[in-house]
Image (cartoon, grey):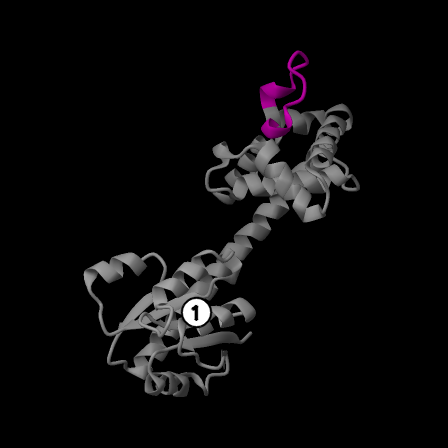
Amino acid sequence: MKKNLLIASNNVADAKGIEAAFQSLEDIRLLPSVFTGRDAIDTIFARDVDLLILDLFLHDLDGICVLDFIGKLSEDRRPLVFVTTALADDRLLQIIKDRVIYCFTKPLKYDLVQLRVLEFMRLYERETEKADEVVDILESQIAAGIRAIGVPAHLKGYYYLRDAIRIYAMSESPVDLSITNDIYPTVAKIYNTRPPLVEHAVRNAIEIAWTRGNTDTIREYFGYTVHDYKGKPSNLEFVAMMAQRALTYLKR
């Protein structure tokens, strides 16, 4: 699939030189170059920009303003950003270091720009493919686990549970997640429903599994939580334990 490349430069000659370096590549689609920060922001807002070569000293709004705008976008809308500058002092590099992939200092060598952009583009493609593969395996393990303990696949709660467990498992800080304030609203948004309905369906699915499901599998998965005096786990306990089991499988 072709990647959309936007060049935002303060120099027509540099823009044309970079365009010439990329125009013959089959996996790159050149968007019309822009020469102001406002035009860069407008293009990023209106188009799917995968790669951005951004001069830090643009007319009207500078490159830092463009980076600030990109930082407010959802992660899937953010392009890989490469910056160009004639002034690469330590203070400037400190400001941009966590927001860009690579910094080119002027005068530019257009063949080097092409080489570095392609290197990082392909590196990120490989990392994305690996991440997608991990997510696919994780989701498969979650679904298999839900079915194994006896949650029927025709229930809405089955799908709500699957996504709730995935959200918990993929969170950078799951212990900080609130099932009421974070997980239920996120799942509700996915299915265009309301959080209380998600909570009810999840509770009902767990109840059905505990009363009609495979007791041996439930004991294997949840251990002491299925003692008669304790009853079934809470919704959050269920989600957390199923997420941990799926993540443990990935680490094998």
Examine the image and state in which quarter residue 156 appears.
top right
At mark 1, the secondary structure is helix
Relative to residue 92, is residue 170 drawn left or right? right
Q: Residue at x 71, y 29 (%)?
A: 203
Number of numbered labels in the structure image:
1
Q: In x, y percent, where is residue 146?
A: 68, 37
Examine the image and state in which quarter residue 165 appears.
top right
Foreground residue among 173 and 153: 173
For the record, the magenta segment spans 223-237
Q: Is residue 40 above or below residue 206?
A: below
Foreground residue among 204 and 74: 74
Q: Residue at x 61, y 20 (%)?
A: 225
Relative to residue 241, is residue 212 drawn left or right? right
Q: In x, y percent, where is residue 51?
A: 45, 71
Residue 249 in sight here? no
Residue type indicated by callout 1: Arg
Q: Is residue 170 above or below residue 118?
A: above
Residue matched to label 1: 122
Q: Residue at x 59, y 19 (%)?
A: 224
Foreground residue among 93 and 155: 93
Q: Residue at x 59, y 52 (%)?
A: 136
